[in-house]
Image (tube, coloured by chain):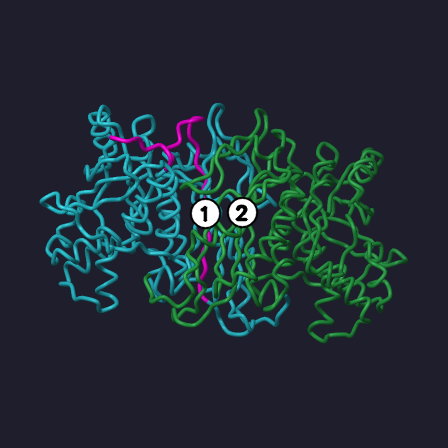
Chain colours: A green, B cyan
Amino acid sequence: MQSPPTLPKLSEFGLIEQFFAQPALSLSAAQGRIKLGIGDDCALISPRAGYELAVSTDMLIEGRHFLPGVDAALLGHKALAVNLSDLAACGAEPVAFTLSMALPAANADWLAAFSQGLFALADAYEICLIGGDTTKSVQPDGKQAGPICLSITVMGELPQGTALLRSGAQVGDDIYVSGTLGDARLALGHFFKEWALSDASFASTRLRMEQPEPRVTLGVALRGIASSAVDVSDGFLGDLQHILSRSHVGAQVMADALPKSAALQSEPLDRQRLCSLSGGDDYELIFTAAPSHASAVEAAARAATTRITRVGRITADKTLQLLDHDKKPLENRYASFDHFI
Amino acid sequence: MQSPPTLPKLSEFGLIEQFFAQPALSLSAAQGRIKLGIGDDCALISPRAGYELAVSTDMLIEGRHFLPGVDAALLGHKALAVNLSDLAACGAEPVAFTLSMALPAANADWLAAFSQGLFALADAYEICLIGGDTTKSVQPDGKQAGPICLSITVMGELPQGTALLRSGAQVGDDIYVSGTLGDARLALGHFFKEWALSDASFASTRLRMEQPEPRVTLGVALRGIASSAVDVSDGFLGDLQHILSRSHVGAQVMADALPKSAALQSEPLDRQRLCSLSGGDDYELIFTAAPSHASAVEAAARAATTRITRVGRITADKTLQLLDHDKKPLENRYASFDHFI
């Protein structure tokens, strides 16, 4: 739809070329699989022989997934991180991603910071930007500025048949979680004045909310060891439920064994449970493994220098049962976050 | 970010399952390459041995790429069609796509119509929906409804090294266009009261604007024959310029030889030129081929049952020169559409 010029002439192609020409730092690994990058109608990818491609997509909307005015570099990091987290949950090695953006204005400072945050993470995981689309964001009347909307699709590769799936959990498997849970939710509650944190607690937990670290290395290390995996984006209970549903099993979870940061541990017990069980935005991995693989799981976590914690066990009874310190059943009133409720 | 319930409880997962479980009509071709579809953290794709994957992405924003209130079935068609058009321009066979949507509300009628339009086209080209993300669209304040935002990433496959690229045009090559150009622009001008069309003209050209047909079959047929290709999304001149820039060549184009519908041919000459040269939203293919391939080009077009027209020639002089009926130079004042101007 054509509309009169309203912005300084920084064209779509100019935008892409100026800020999204990825500095070719450490991309040798991915580049072997990328036959053609950005700039044509399509990019071209060839997975290595014997490998398959894992694909995932996530969209982030201003006012819904991030706050207006959020630091652009942190946003660039997070937009890619939440997508890399899906690759991690499958055990795939990142190869390439596309980025589509609707922006209310073409602000050079914002774009510079956003692309810096984005590419710092992309370079760390040797993933190439291979295509994209940039549009002016408008409100439905076509006149006023609309929200920032970011859509990323990631592609990774892994040896055929080795993907960690939600459907592989077996009765008797141990349930593990990486890192710690609940910090993003704790920071969000402070932000929305549900509770008040100390400056130190808010600073540390806010970082977890704004700059999550995808568990890519751990996911790759768990191939052939874990029986199932999922990443924690909507909250521990809701995401564990995905494993249970797809695997047709249940689970017993020791609610207070969920790994928590020092900041969260200093909060009242009910808040600890709320944040760790249903918080969302954690981007840790939940995975299951047979007890006979326990030492292999430990070795994988050490190799990935990632803390893991055993938090429960897969059961034949198709329910998710929470237990307290004394192994007594705990009422489950910790709903998971749903982006469309 | 959590917010109080504002919609009837039609959850993200419910939405996806209810409307986006693709009816498995004619998907056998693509399904061989899709090892895992929707429902896990990632989908898994294996291109056939000796094939590579073509990837492209496009985002459509309400008020920018389509009008508020547009028929949802037509929108579902168009959102996928503009992406398939990019695969067509590379000569790739469609395999899979992801769909992310931000919607102001979860309206069951709208979703049913949208998914019907989407899957009718998906089934016609045997392409599978393998992943997605659904979010509530809000304005930046997080309170009022935001615009509909649709982001699709398509994946196709083609034998290694056979992709039609923008960079392959050679001096002396013929320049061809598929179908007809300018109808979408002609309809848009009527809609925005730049000019008035007869009811019959508006009806036929509006269909071209709202329901473009991607030239996938032609693109595949042109592999090994065409030296370069691009699809017409931003307008003939702007998109031809992509070929010229990437191929380091120029072109002479017979402006009035551009193929036009009967509706557009009945308009004044200047409007014909404006719409066909710079209209945008045509989703036809521009491609080049050596004169020695002329009969192979004709055969490919017949096989694809797609009209093609020779409209010019690639030159060594790196400019784009427009010629009128009498082969006299025509001033080029037909700018191309840029989504961020």
Between B144 and B177, the one lying in front of the other is: B177
Q: Where is residue A109 in the image (x, y as percent from the top left)?
A: 56, 62
Query: Can the viewer see residue A247?
Result: no
Query: In the rendering, which numbered label is found on residue A191?
Result: none
Q: Quadrant of residue B294?
A: top left
Q: Is residue A234 left or right of residue B223?
A: right
Residue found at the very far front of the displayed protein: B317
Residue A73: quarter of image? bottom right
Image position, residue B280 (x, y; %): 29, 53
Which residues, given as a range, are shown in magenta? B147-172
Task: Identify the residue position indicated by label 2 in the image.
Answer: A153
Looking at the picture, which amino acid does disc 1 mark? Thr
Name the chain letter of the residue that bears numbered label 2: A
Residue B110 image position (x, y, % from top left): 40, 62
Q: Are marks 1 and 2 in contact (CB under 8 Å)?
A: yes
Identity, as a three-letter code, of the amino acid under mark 2: Thr
Helix, strand or loop at label 1? It is strand
Residue B155, magenta (yes or no): yes
C-alpha distance separating marks 1 and 2: 9 Å
Q: Does A8 appear above or below B220? A: below
In the picture, the quarter occupied by the N terminus of chain B is bottom right
Q: What residue would you read off at disc 1?
A: B57
Q: Using a 10 Å C-alpha cutoff, classify the residue at mark 1 as few (fewer than 14 neighbours), some (14 to 19) or many (20 or more).
A: many
Question: In terms of secondary structure, where does tag 2 sit?
Answer: strand
Of residues A52 and A40, which is closer to you in this image?
A40
Tell me if A12 is positioned left or right of A154 in this view. Answer: left
Horizontally, residue B183 falls left or right of residue A332, namely left
